[in-house]
């Protein structure tokens, strides 16, 4: 079995992991009601998607 010839230092391993970043969720404004929603999803507030009513909501 292959084994490392030398131990990888803590610093070297931590340098490699510095690029693991949590990104914020992308949100866009609903064109009808202005609510912030995830892209390519039905707006939970007004029930529209691509300016068409998909879910009937009581207003």
Image (spheres, helix red, strand yellow):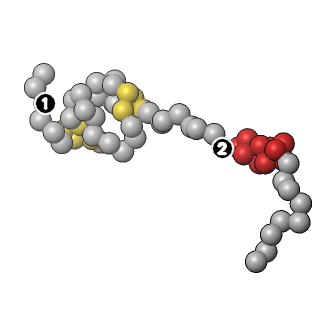
Residue 30 falls left or right of residue 55: right
At x 24%, y 28%, the residue is 45
Quadrant of residue 41 within the rendered picture = top left
Q: Residue furthest right?
A: 6
Estimate how packed mark 2 is, as few (under 14), some (14 to 19) or many (20 or more) residues with alpha carbons within 10 Å.
Answer: few
Badge 1 marks a residue whose secondary structure is loop
As drawn, 35 above or below 41: above
Q: What is the tally of numbered marks visible in this picture?
A: 2
Indicate the quadrant where residue 49 lies.
top left
Q: Quadrant of the C terminus?
A: top left
Where residue 7 appears, as percent x and y from the top left, is: 85, 56
Residue 58 appears left or right of 27: left
Q: In the picture, residue 47 is in which quadrant?
A: top left
Q: From mark 1 to mark 2, how far is it between C-alphas?
A: 41 Å
Q: Earlier in the sequence, mark 1 or mark 2?
A: 2
Comparing 48 with 2, the one in front is: 2
* Whether residue 50 is situated above or below residue 35 in the rendered picture: below
- Given this view, does label 1 or label 2 mark the residue nearer the observer? 2
Q: Residue at x 73, y 41 (%)?
A: 18
Q: Residues within 10 Å of mark 1 (few under 14, many from 20)?
A: few
Q: Position of residue 13 (x, y in %)?
A: 78, 48
Q: Which mark is residue 20?
A: 2
* Residue 31 horizontal side relative to residue 17, left or right: left
**Which residue is nearer to you in this view: 23 or 10?**
10
Residue at 28 percent of width and 24 percent of height: 33
Q: Secondary structure at mark 2?
A: loop
**Which residue sits furthest bottom?**
1
- What residue does disc 1 label? 57
Q: Residue at coordinates 10% horizontally, 26% vertically from top-left? A: 58
């Amino acid at each position: 079995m292959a084994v490392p010839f030398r131990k990888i230092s803590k610093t070297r391993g931590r340098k490699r992991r510095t690029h693991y970043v949590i990104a914020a969720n992308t949100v866009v404004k609903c064109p009808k009601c202005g609510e912030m929603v995830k892209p390519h999803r039905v707006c939970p507030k007004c029930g529209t998607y691509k300016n068409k009513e998909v879910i009937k909501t009581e207003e």
